[in-house]
Image (cartoon, grey):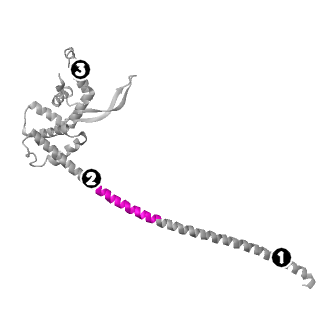
Amino acid sequence: MNSEILDFRTLLTIIYEHFGTGEFTARELSDRLREAISNPALIANPAFLKVYRRVSKKMISNDLRRLYAMGFLKRRRVKRKVMTKSGKVCHRGYEYRYSLSSQGLKYLAYMASGGHEREEQEGFEDFLVKIFIEKKAPEEIRDILWEFYETQMKDRKGFRRFSTSQMAFWDKVLERITEIFRDKRIKSLEERVKALEEENKELREKIRKLEMEKTAYKTLNEKLLLMLTEIMELTDRALEKAEHFKEENERYREIVKRVNKVFAELGPITGK
C-alpha cells in the first residue's frame, strides 16, 4: 500500500466495498483503512508510518469533502456523539454522515464497464469540469463557477469546438466561466453603485427637508417663546391691577361702613 491508494477512483471503490450505499463518517472510514493496513507485514515496512498518517481522520475528511464537491458523495449533518471519561454518551458539535450519490454510483459502474459509451460521455465531461475547477479555482468561488458552467456554458451549442486540446479546452471553459462571473459581478456592482447613488440622493433630499423642518420648528419655537413672554408680562400686569382693585375695593368698603355709621348716628337726631 502506498500514498497513491487514495486517489479518488480508488477511494470510491474502497467506500463501496466497505459501506455499499450505506452511510459512514470520516472517522469510520479512517478506522477501516487503518485496520486494513495494521498487520505485521505492513507495519515492518519503512513507509508504514507515512501511510498510516495519510489515512488519519483529518486527511480522510479532506478527501471526502473533495469527493462531495465533485458530486460523488452526498452528506447530512448530524450531532456528534462522544463518550466522556465517566462513560456517559453525549453530543458535542456536529459531523457529516456521507453516502454514495447517484453520480458516484454511476461513475463506479462507468469504471467497472471500462467503456466510453456515448450516453455516459456527458456525465464524464461534467466530472472533468468539476476536477478542473477543484484543482484550479479558489475554493470560495468553486460553487459559483460550477453553477455558471451548468447554466451558461453546458447547454450552448458549439462551445466545445474551439479547441482540440483537452487541457486547453478546459482552460478555455474555466476562462469563459471566470469571464462570465466577472462580468456579472461587475454588472452587479454597477447596479449596486447606482442603487446606492439613488439611495444617497433620497437621503440628501430627506436631510434637506429635515433641515427645513428644523429651521421652521426653530422659528416657530422662537415665536412661541416670544408670545409666552408677552403673555407672562400681561399676566403680571393683570395681577398687579387686580391687587390694586382689591386695595381700592377695601377702601371703598371702609368708606361705605363709615357713611352707614354716620347715617345710623344721625337717624335719631333727625327723627327719621
Disc 1: which residue: 257
Q: Secondary structure at mark 2?
A: helix
* Alpha carbon separation for disc pair 2 and 1: 98 Å
Residue 140: x and y, percent?
25, 41
- Earlier in the chain: of badge 3 and badge 2, it is 3
Q: Is residue 200 above or below residue 27?
A: below
Instruction: Classify the position of the N terminus by image quarter.
Output: top left
59 relative position to 153: left or right? right
Q: Are marks 3 and 2 in contact (CB under 8 Å)?
A: no
Looking at the image, which residue is at 87% across and 79% down?
Answer: 262
Q: Which residues are magenta?
A: 193-214
Residue 68: x and y, percent?
22, 35
* Alpha carbon separation for disc pair 3 and 2: 51 Å
204 relative position to 24: left or right? right
- Residue type, mark 2 in image: Leu
Q: Nearer the viewer, mark 2 or mark 1?
A: 2
* Alpha carbon separation for disc pair 1 and 3: 130 Å
Residue 101: x and y, percent?
20, 35
Disc 2: which residue: 189
Q: Are marks 2 and 1 in contact (CB under 8 Å)?
A: no
Can residue 150 be seen here? The reply is no
The label shown at residue 49 is 3
**Residue 127 in which image quadrant:** top left
